Amino acid sequence: MDLSALLTSAGINTAICVILLSLYSILRKQPSNVSVYFGRRLASGGFRQKDPFILERFVPSPSWILKAWETTEEEILSIGGMDAVVFLRITVFSIRVFSISAIVCCFIVLPVNYYGRMSHQQIPSESLESFTILNVQEGSKWLWCHCVALYIITCSACTLLYFEYKSITKMRLIHLTESPPNPSHFTVLVRAIPWSPEESYSNLVEKFFMNYHALGYLSHKMVHRSGTVQKLMSDAEKMYRVFKAASTEQSCRPGLMGCGMCGGPTNSFKILSSETSNVSGKDFQDMDLHRKKDCAAAFVFFKTRYAAVVASQVRQSSNPMSWVTELAPEPHDVYWSNLWIPYGQLWIRKIATLLAAIAFMVVFLIPVTFVQGLTQLEQLQQTFPFLKGILKKKYFSQLVTGYLPSVILILAFYIVPPTMMLFSAVEGSISRSGRKTSACCKVLYFTIWNVFFVNVFTGSIIRQLRVFSSVKDIPAQLANAIPVQASFFMTYVLSSGWASLSCEVMQVFPLLCNVIKKCILRNKIDSPNATLSFPYHTETPRLLLFGFLGFTCSILVPLILPFLLAYFVLAYFVYRNQILNVYASKYESGGQFWPIVHNTTIFSLAFMQIIALGVFGLRKSPVASGFTIPLFICTLLFNEYCRQRFHPIFQSHAAEVLIEMDRRDERLGRMEDIYQQLHSVYCHPNENCNEPCRSESSNHHREDMESIRDPETVKPGKELGQVIGSWAVHHRSLDTRE
Amino acid sequence: MDLSALLTSAGINTAICVILLSLYSILRKQPSNVSVYFGRRLASGGFRQKDPFILERFVPSPSWILKAWETTEEEILSIGGMDAVVFLRITVFSIRVFSISAIVCCFIVLPVNYYGRMSHQQIPSESLESFTILNVQEGSKWLWCHCVALYIITCSACTLLYFEYKSITKMRLIHLTESPPNPSHFTVLVRAIPWSPEESYSNLVEKFFMNYHALGYLSHKMVHRSGTVQKLMSDAEKMYRVFKAASTEQSCRPGLMGCGMCGGPTNSFKILSSETSNVSGKDFQDMDLHRKKDCAAAFVFFKTRYAAVVASQVRQSSNPMSWVTELAPEPHDVYWSNLWIPYGQLWIRKIATLLAAIAFMVVFLIPVTFVQGLTQLEQLQQTFPFLKGILKKKYFSQLVTGYLPSVILILAFYIVPPTMMLFSAVEGSISRSGRKTSACCKVLYFTIWNVFFVNVFTGSIIRQLRVFSSVKDIPAQLANAIPVQASFFMTYVLSSGWASLSCEVMQVFPLLCNVIKKCILRNKIDSPNATLSFPYHTETPRLLLFGFLGFTCSILVPLILPFLLAYFVLAYFVYRNQILNVYASKYESGGQFWPIVHNTTIFSLAFMQIIALGVFGLRKSPVASGFTIPLFICTLLFNEYCRQRFHPIFQSHAAEVLIEMDRRDERLGRMEDIYQQLHSVYCHPNENCNEPCRSESSNHHREDMESIRDPETVKPGKELGQVIGSWAVHHRSLDTRE
């Protein structure tokens, strides 16, 4: 691939980006697309419809970019929560560090690379390889430039990382103390309650915590089985009982067995129990039913945050496999479908999903290898001789080498996030944010492995048919293979990077669903339950992958850096806009993503240094190698220091902070209000808490409220349009997003 | 090496063993050796001197073996503590599992190996290789025997491991609840107390714990700097002050500044402070002195065990690098020299010692490579042609190949445990048992790496000059290399194993010191401070190494198993005898060694299976390979299950258990007694606690008591004989033992 092909690719991508962004700026002004582009503002009620018929509606304008630019971090924090701020910090950090890298590499490293060997063609038809380190001669005296660049990039990255980590931990502490009382701080999820033939789980929980945590224990709430099959079965049973009961008696009185389900001071009853108890004489049968439906898990509420954190961190029972406690997730963050999983299964589920994820990575090699073949035209022509005629045409060959591989890869990658989300769900996460974090890590490993390593390795294997002869040679092999693959990485940044941002801002899939809904099904109502939550598990790995590519390629292929910088700047505006307008934050992990970002960046830096070692070894520059080793050691030590200094803050809360918060709330007399809330907020979306007896209609209302809170729970029996709309949301949320 | 050489070696070693054991049975009856062979019983006062002059004294007898056999586990538990029982369980487990292995392998695998190829010489001059798996032909149908043996060994080992782990965790729980109240359960070690210019550390600790742990906090005790230099300096200063004070005033009153050091209800004073405060007008100077001597660490005492465990497990401060808490070790287990280390240094110390240990392992390759050369006579003759004449002689060559290599290796290995103990001390362990556990792991990795892997690799490299071409080939290479090295491993078991047990029971070094003391220096007093603590960090890795060799070689070289079994049986009697008579248990880790034993055994099993895979691959038996893979996976799953089920019990105490213990003590009214004790037991051996003012003589008495408690602290100014005696102990304790 030569420079002109690269510029063709860049041209195509820039044009597509400009067209899509202009289209977006027009589409977002159409009143019919409000639910697509202003989902969050619609849901929060802060959206006012503008006058529909003015010329302005059909003229593209950069107003959304200005709006995104002007919004302060405080506003983002209040709108999108801390997770959104932390996510945007990734883009800010990347812009900063790659600005420095781009300046250093383009003004120091690029000229050294280009003038390394003297024979040059005209610049447009110059091969990309003459801009890479492959062009530097062995034993060149100019390699110290690369070493200096390495030092500058590493030091600036570490300094920026340190201050980011510091400010994010500070933000996390402030967020913890300043935000309104969070029920999850008072709640502990107890699992693996031992089975007893005499007593129900609920009684056991009450006895245990009254015995060992008498001072702190407030009340508890059992968890019921609620898989899809379970729900269908219980619905059928419920219907049968309702019909049967309706034929005998219609009165409504509290159930005898209700207390068996929800213990503690605030007695609450499930509508099912109040109905079934009408059938007198079946008490024992009912109790059996409840016992079957109860899981060996419960939410236990404590009087203070400190008591809850103590109960969650100290091992409760002499058998480590029973009475397992951990702090509960936020009410909206609870992943109800996984709560019933027996604790004893978790370790084997984790191993199984790990193996499945690894198997998936390996199977995925097939499309990647195919894509790799496309960038090397000669190989392709040899393998498929009938293509020779077509590939001779210049534009076509440029399109194939410059664009097609990335498109195929992107399409193949669309199945990765939902698969990883599925794995994380099977793994047994009890919180949505935990599931997303776990999926985020899996997607990250997957992307870095499949985009970077497999491309580099298959590229070098296709060309050389050589395996690594020993571990010592890996850096040198990588140093040779990466510049060879430079063209692929550049086109990947251009196509996958830029295009993905345009698609993100366009919201192609919801837009299509909206068009179908509005134009074909003639459904004019904007349902507010269409708001999505931010897809951290796909977007974080994407940003990190580009960061990884940037660091790895910086001194080898400096030409990639301006394109990357453009990507990160665009990402900054696009994601700000999306957080402000599209995605609603339903739960908060308090910046749990940042340690992943930090570790990945350190890995990228260390990897960059290892490759640099390989480069200096190949180019026979012992001085530069000698200077790289201490840098590598210092980077690892810096990482270890950060792990010691900051990471525990993301794992648990400090006694000091919690006790001060408890005291403040007690002083302000807020404790009683909090206790009142606790029992009702941890309520399964299909369940009815706190109201002992209510009519079916109010129950419907409650379910509607739940579905606003939880877009993933789609109710049947709505209008067809709404069904398709919510199906689209549901599908999308399962697919690439939630 | 042929069978006759092996038998020569076995003969020499058996003879040496019998001679040494007979010598031991005579020497132990001599009244002059009482302090060497009955140190523990002498210290505990349970030893009665027999009539000195009877014939029986000079006749060897197996009475000590009978005594060791007859002692029950309960007696061992009461004498040597739980650690001793757990240690003996390793031998019992090994005897059981290797009995099964020996039967299976000698009756199934050995005949298959021997009759694999038909051409046989006379048995005595048969090469050892014809008893190994190298003798089985490719594609042999009899390889299923090896696979069945593999299954039997793995299943029996896992079953035994499970029941051992289960009974040891049960024992640990019983030990925790049934033993007398342990001050360490009430005590938390706080480190990284933040520096404040206004207040002393002591005040800060009191304020912090009174504020956040008002209910549980009892009192605290600051830690002072006490390195050797520090001690010398403070001694000099003390002497100067004593002399100066003696010239002005002789009265004795409590110091004004004493409270600055020890806070809480039980005010105690250090003799230094009571003396220096006599010099009036120097209060500020004194306070400065104390502040300099105080470290940012303190023992904090709590009213209940539960309060202590809560304070130790919940993170205290929002800055994870300050107010770091952990449960304190037992008073006699505290490693005082490390308490002053600033917490912020620990992580870097850990990394530094890890690197140092790895570097030490690499440097140690030199003697190992040299030893490896000796077992291959041809190589040796080629390298040193002048040796040819000597090596031609048959007995000499048998001696060189059968005995010398192991002796050199053993001698070189004598420097390993003290070096690793040094590393573990530098690492910053705060307890002696922690230091020993850490050293135990290091010695274990070191031994397995240097005895096993390096021998196998250098052996195969010398012969084949081939490096591993890929990771996939490692099992096959190992499967080839290990039987080749069979002769070395057998001689290693014979020489290092059997001889080390004889040396252990003979106590060669203390015996020599005793002889010097008694005969040359004419010192007849048996000082009771000569009792040693059991050297778990040298003996556990040794047992585990032989276990590792046994598993690895079982199906490859079944001939090794009878020798190993003999080793473990002898070890059982020797260690029982030593625990009963020689070593005193000064502190208790509660079986902390068992998880290391468990993990090493699982590693050995998994390694055995990987090698078996290599064997079946080389011998082209896909069925046997296919059956080995599920076994490997099941072994790893079994390990993970045990880690989930049992390991947490060795890491922390359960709330349930601690609260019950607190309640029982409260019911029995023992709490006040415990509180009284707490402050005085955590007392530096050089320091004087609890007694505000006492004369020099009683102080001397106290120091004597301390030195009984702690043999590593040797006091100057005693008689020369005692000095040498205690120097020997001291030296030995630093050297191979403590």
Image (cartoon, coloured by chain):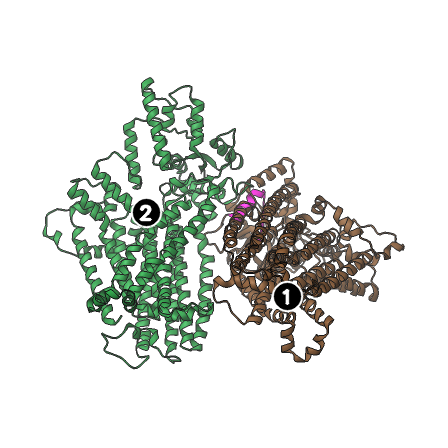
Chain colours: A brown, B green
Element at label 2: loop
What is the x, y in percent for residue B441? 39, 54
What quarter of the picture does the N terminus of chain A occupy? bottom right
Q: Nearer the viewer, residue A320 or B375?
A: B375
In magenta, the rendered stretch is A298-313
Which chain is home to disc 1?
A: A
Q: Which residue is mark 1?
A: A229
Residue displayed at 32% across by 80% down: B117
Give the class, few, some or many, for how many residues have Cα within 10 Å of label 2's Cα (few <14, many ≥20). Answer: many
Q: Is residue A163 left or right of residue B358?
A: right
Q: Report the disc number at residue B738.
A: 2
Q: CA distance from mark 1 to mark 2?
A: 62 Å
- Image spot of residue A236 (x, y percent): 67, 66
Quarter of the view holding residue B713: top left
- Residue at screen point 40% across, 58% down: B166
Disc 1 element = helix
Residue A133 in view of the camera: yes
Residue A418 in sight in this render: no
